Image (cartoon, rainbow, N blue to C red):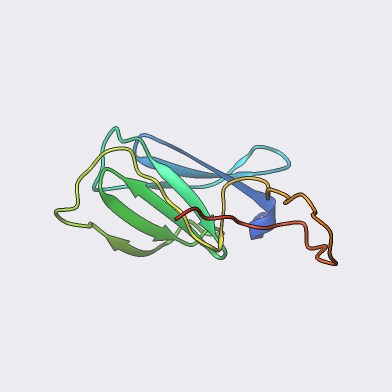
């Protein structure tokens, strides 16, 4: 039996409790799963950050290789608290880009981020 080779563009990610899963985006077949040793029954957040999958559970933050599920690094963020995590990155993707309405000019990139301060 041959091993299926998948790239980042072939995967989608989800997380429940203390586990993260990569699924084949075409078949739904599980490509890999990763279980957190530090968190239990958490409300996880995941963020695909370019070539890294950032995962956060109950105050712990992890970086996984999104293709293999291997742990790259972890940070317990000691003393910073727990709760429902929120992740953000300029490189991250959590959905479709939001197009900016055109107001004249020649800018046709169509994707912009607005930050209120």
Up-down relation of residue 42 to residue 55 (above or below): above
Camera-side residue: 107 or 30?
107
Q: Position of residue 38 (x, y in %)?
A: 23, 47
Q: Is residue 5 visible?
A: no
Q: Position of residue 92 (x, y in %)?
A: 54, 57
Question: Residue at horizontal 42%, vertical 51%?
Answer: 87
Q: Is residue 42 left or right of residue 45?
A: left
Quadrant housing residue 4: bottom right
Q: Is residue 2 left or right of residue 35?
A: right
Q: Position of residue 75 (x, y in %)?
A: 27, 61
Quadrant housing residue 23: top right
Q: How many marks?
A: 0
Up-down relation of residue 37 to residue 111 (above or below): above
Q: Is residue 7 visible?
A: yes
Q: Is residue 27 left or right of residue 60?
A: right
Q: Is residue 93 left or right of residue 97?
A: left
Question: Residue at horizontal 56%, vertical 65%?
Answer: 51
Question: Residue at horizontal 80%, vertical 53%?
Answer: 102
Camera-side residue: 112 or 53?
112
């Amino acid at each position: 039996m041959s091993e299926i080779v998948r790239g980042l563009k072939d995967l989608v990610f989800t997380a429940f409790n203390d586990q993260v899963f990569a699924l084949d985006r075409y078949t739904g077949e599980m490509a890999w799963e990763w279980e957190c040793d530090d968190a239990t029954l958490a409300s996880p957040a995941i963020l695909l950050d370019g070539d890294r999958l950032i995962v956060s559970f109950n105050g712990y933050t992890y970086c996984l290789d999104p293709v293999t599920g291997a742990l790259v690094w972890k940070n317990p963020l000691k003393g910073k608290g727990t709760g429902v995590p929120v992740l953000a990155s300029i490189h991250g993707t959590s959905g479709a880009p939001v197009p900016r309405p055109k107001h004249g000019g020649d800018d046709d990139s169509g994707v912009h981020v607005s930050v209120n301060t």
